[in-house]
Image (tube, rainbow, N blue to C red):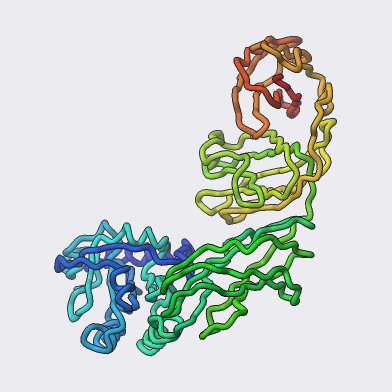
Amino acid sequence: MKLNSILLAIAFVFSAVQIGFAQLPDGSVAPDFTITDIEGEDHNLYSYLDSGYSVIIDFSATWCGPCWNYHTSGVFEELYAAHGPDGSNELRILFIESDNNTTDDDLHGTGTNTWGDWTEGVDYPIADNGGSVFNAYECAFYPTIMTVCPNRLLKQTGQASFDSHAAYVQSIECAPASLPLDVGLVDYIGSVRSCPNTPTELGVTLINNGTEPLTSCTLEATTLFGTELLTYEWTGYLDTYEMENVNLGDAIFPTTSMFSIEVTSEDGYDGNNSVTATMNLSQETATSLLRVQITTDNMPGDNRWSISDLSGEEVAGTAFGDMSESNTDYNWWVNLEALGCFTFNLFDLTGNGGDLSCSFSTYNEGGFQTNNIFSLNNNGNWDQLNKGFSVNEVNMSIGESFGIAPIAIFPNPLNQENEVQISGLTGQETRIELHSSTGALIRTWIQPSQSGTLNLPIGKLESGLYIISVHDSNGIQSQRLIKS
């Protein structure tokens, strides 16, 4: 192997490890796939699982030093001999070379980007060009080694010893269903944020790990301190390994708290009867009128924001790329027009956070700021930040003036007009923006350069609330515009 290739491999492995552990978390349902090995044989994951086998998947790359070291340790060869088709016949192993840029020569040790012959002495299947499967499992580094149990749930078992791999495959957690009644809880699927005195729906993914059909069970939710939240009697029909998302109903949390949901009815194995989560109670309050202010860094397309309701549905926000100018101030006005519990989310596409400034605040009917809910001015690494808040007042009426601003808009409200008149301009304005009540930018007029009064063609608008913002070197002046 060439020295340059070795150095490249070491550098790549180091950078890959720095990405972080982003693969599918333990307990996730493994995505199905069919892959063809280098001998031309097809292997379907779910077919193996449905036959009662556990499957170990080794995502590796020919240039990866740690992959080679573990591959040549002989652990998988021993496992396959002892527990594969010629042994106890409870396990299958799939080696998937996951870098599509490597070659068949690299796999067989004759290329320039490899540590050796990966096929030598290997009896279990080896597949090449498995990048799509690697991506489906959201892997971020090599080697990623996962064990998928017959119930289709995965666990990252890593570069473990022969005994550790064998013990997990043979554990009751992973072994094929053997108990008539075995109820399992896979994951919590409800909200993890609420507001004081706000009913919040809880939910779990239920699985039948038993050999007999599951038709009923009792589920209870309690806080860490023993406060009972709810009890739910589930009825239905699940065959072995079938799953169902179950909405348990609403619970009210007295404070931010860890909580658990447990199977409390009769069950053959209690090791999979519980899931835990933390409910974060939002203390910030707001009116329905909100303002988002962001000053971009040198990578403006990497950021976006959203406001989501209690169910997680986005009710306002932007997309990656909507902010296109570096080191530029962006402003959005949002009127949620509803009471309730919401979350403000800030995203960074590459996870480096960047040198971004952000302010998320709320205003009263007179246009005066009443609460700064969220602010950020840092140079840290993050890919998502959020802050919860509750809207406890809806701004129903519109005053003549919005905030302290010398500009004025006429006519307001609009009837059939497609043009408004803005007075109070100084001639130093850099741009004028028209936003919808959800924050969407509708029109921009750059450097109007006109003092006094300006007639602004805004086109046809649907009925509703809009915000006109006038930007100059001293800041931003905004007025509400109503289209009747």
Above or below, 298 against 107 in this view is above
Q: Is residue 379 above or below residue 181?
A: above
Residue 331 shows in this picture: no
The number of numbered discs placed on residues in the rendered structure image is: 0
User: For this view, does 435 lie left or right of residue 36?
Assistant: right
Q: Position of residue 370 (x, y in %)?
A: 83, 41
Coordinates of residue 35 in the picture (x, y in percent): 25, 63
**Residue 354: percent from left, percent from top:** 58, 49
Q: Position of residue 266 (x, y in %)?
A: 57, 83
Q: Nearer the viewer, residue 290 or 240?
A: 240
- Front residue of 230 and 418: 230
Query: What residue is drawn where x is 32% and y is 78%?
Result: 53
> Which residue is at the front of the view, 100 or 244?
244
Q: Is residue 80 left or right of residue 372?
A: left
Looking at the image, can residue 190 be seen?
Answer: yes
Point out the image quarter for the C terminus: top right
Q: For the N terminus, which image quadrant?
A: bottom left
Of the pair 162 and 406, the residue shown nearer to us: 162
Residue 44, above or below 382: below
In the rendered image, which quarter is residue 39 located in? bottom left
> Residue 229 vs residue 50: left or right?
right
* Residue that appears at 63% across and 12% down: 457
Q: Which residue is at 53% across, 54% downward? A: 351
